Amino acid sequence: MSTSLEILRVAIPTPLRRHFDYLVPLQHAEWCQPGCRVRVPFGRQQRLGVILERVTHSDVPPHKLKRVEKVLDDSAVIPSDLLDLLRFASDYYQHAIGEVIAAALPAALRAGKSTQHNSVHWRITAAGHAAQIPVRAAKQTAVLARLRQAPHALSEADLKSGLPGLSPVLQRLHTAGWIEPITIALDPMTPWAATPAPALSAEQTSVIEHLREQQGFGVSLLDGITGSGKTEVYLQWIAEHLARHRQVLMLVPEIGLTPQLLSRFSTRLHAPIALWHSGLSDSERLQTWRAARTGSAAVFIGTRSAVFLPLRDPALVIIDEEHDPSFKQQEGFRYSARDLAVLRARRWNVPILLGSATPSLETLANVARQRYTAVHLTQRAGGAQPPRFQILDMRRQPLDHGLSMPLIQRMREHLNDQAQVLLFLNRRGFAPALLCHDCGWIATCPRCDAHLTLHRHEQQLRCHHCGLQRRENQQCPTCQSSALVGIGIGTERIESGLRTAFADVEIVRIDRDTTRRKGSLGKLLERVREGRRQILVGTQMLSKGHHFPNVTLVGILDTDQGLHSADFRATERMAQQIMQVSGRAGRADRPGEVLIQTHHPDHPLLHTLITQGYNAFAQATLQEREQTELPPFSHMAILRAESTRASAALDFLRQVADRLATLAPATLHHYGPFPAPMEKRAGRVRAQLVLISKTRGSLQTTLRQLLTVIETDLASRSVRWSIDVDPIDMY
């Protein structure tokens, strides 16, 4: 049925894959433009939604249409280019448009907070100039020093640059009468500049010249070995755009990389820098969002959801460590920030730079297809040499807390030279399992198909999959024996063993357990950078982006899991981890060495990686993928299902597979359904159905048809299901 009324199509954050139609409000109808927020009746509740479009017809009968109750904005909160991208992402990733749009807004805006913003600046008072601050009040001293040197008031963003957790400090100084706030209108035309840059190497200069040649959109891969100076290229390329007073978006894979980047960028770039990541408060995220929209900040450094920031005048997009799986959202709206960033740059008509020492196979395939261009940094900065590799065959070798005797001997030699040693194991906790030595009982998670990990220091058993925690057993629940032993090794166990074997050496463990508190990671990294004789023990948090000039030996304790995994991407990730963590060795004037422990020293891919380098490994792996018709030579989606009932998920996917047989073209194949590699997780039984197609278009068409069938005929309240397009793991 049609109607001539004015209709608003509104996206509301619900799992329903559709928009909802409403009549324009009685007041401020002229404000009702795409991208504006509205408050609408939804069932018995009121919900906040975003206008998608304004039309004159609806399939809903006119008498059933409800009216928008309030328009919250007089101009679009989501600009048209971003709204178009979000609608594309909803369609491509087969996810509800309302939830997609909600993911692009900070929580404060989803709650209805105003987008308007005046910037609070602080200036020092006469009392502040004369104040004597106790030595222990380091942050207060730093703030007053900055304000004393500044010719004018400084914004909170400027003051907080490099000084996290500053809000209470500012309030204490204000209460003491030493500083005072002033509110000024934001001036998006404040001049931006940069400190003169150090001299570039010939390779770095060549890369910059290549980037300067780009006019408008283009994708460049900066393929540079670890320690080759990629960050310096970023800084100089950014500085050129700041001179033209334009904005830059830089995505990083993890929160842990943002403090050190912020410190380095703040030193070099005389421009407002804003952060965006999950560790910020709602008000801090809103402040960054506003700075993007108004143009009051120049450089935005953030994790994956920063791809949705509404930059006012973008000039450049950079993705550091583009290969990192953290750029793919793994729950809910399962998008790839890297891929959407490429689309965002295309719509902005600006260049995008993908940086990595170990580029993803998808990116390398795009280079081979001439969709992307590649530039290379093959030499380490400052004349440092790449580390030399050695494989340690662990077969029939005695181990001391997971360390072989040759590795321990080399550690002593490097430490005796007053150097640092880094040991890498991507497994935290004391031991992956707790075993009864008398009867064989193993502590398992009642909610997952997984053993409970022993955390000896906290005397806890934890499931690293669902988060379950309980006290460590003192007796076996089966035979009441007290002969309970931890099986396997984790970073905590390695640390414990090292404190005995290297009693005169400082041990620093860096993993999720030791960095839970805000600021703890930064403090640990500062200890490492002091250069003292130390052994560093850590997980992937240590594997990339860090510069430890005194580390000369890296020991990689276990690579075998990546060689024999059910996930076809496991060897690619293993190789990337090895090369990334190896890059921490020998970054200064002393040569570096990398020792890799393995029970499979003759594995062909491992041998290729060590002897010929990552590029040779990647080319060999690409040949395997092409022969087996796996991504990036095909396009994949996984339909996942889970239920509390044992067979419900599989039964549901069998029905889907039956319907798929009549929908799918000959170019599309499906496999399964079959239980997920970890069948039970968080109390739910999981299964999956894999779809692979030679063409992206046929996969997308089939998915749309299949979702219609599922939602109309097959949906069951007892089964949760989701679509993962371009999945990055098979679990």
Image (cartoon, grey):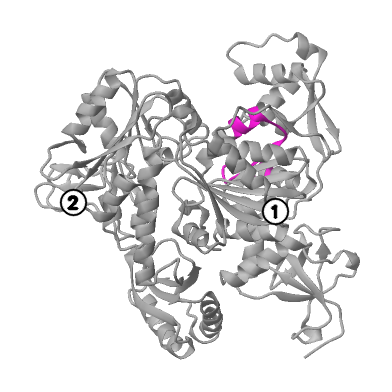
Secondary element at image label 2: loop
Q: Which span of residues is magenta-colored?
A: 262-284
Magenta stretch contains residue 495? no
Task: Give the residue number, with chain letter if any, for mark 2.
Answer: 477
Q: Residue at 58% of width from left, 43% of height from top?
A: 207
**Quarter of the figure with residue 126:** top right
Task: Give the residue number, with chain letter if any, for mark 1.
Answer: 350
Residue flagged by tag 2: what amino acid is it?
A: Pro
Q: Is residue 402 left or right of residue 186?
A: left
Secondary element at image label 1: loop
Mark found first going from the N terminus, 1 or 2: 1
Q: Nearer the viewer, residue 154 or 195?
A: 195
Q: Is residue 461 left or right of residue 382?
A: left
Q: Is residue 708 visible?
A: yes
Quarter that holds the N terminus = bottom right
Q: Is residue 13 visible?
A: no
Mark 1 or 2: the one toward you: 1
Relative to 163, is 320 above or below?
Answer: below
Q: CA distance from mark 1 to mark 2?
A: 63 Å
Q: Nearer the viewer, residue 525 or 726?
A: 726
Place of residue 71 in the rendered image (x, y in percent of width and height, measured from the top left):
83, 62
Residue flagged by tag 1: what amino acid is it?
A: Val
Quarter that holds the C terminus = bottom left
Place of residue 223 in the rendered image (x, y in percent of width and height, measured from the top left):
49, 47
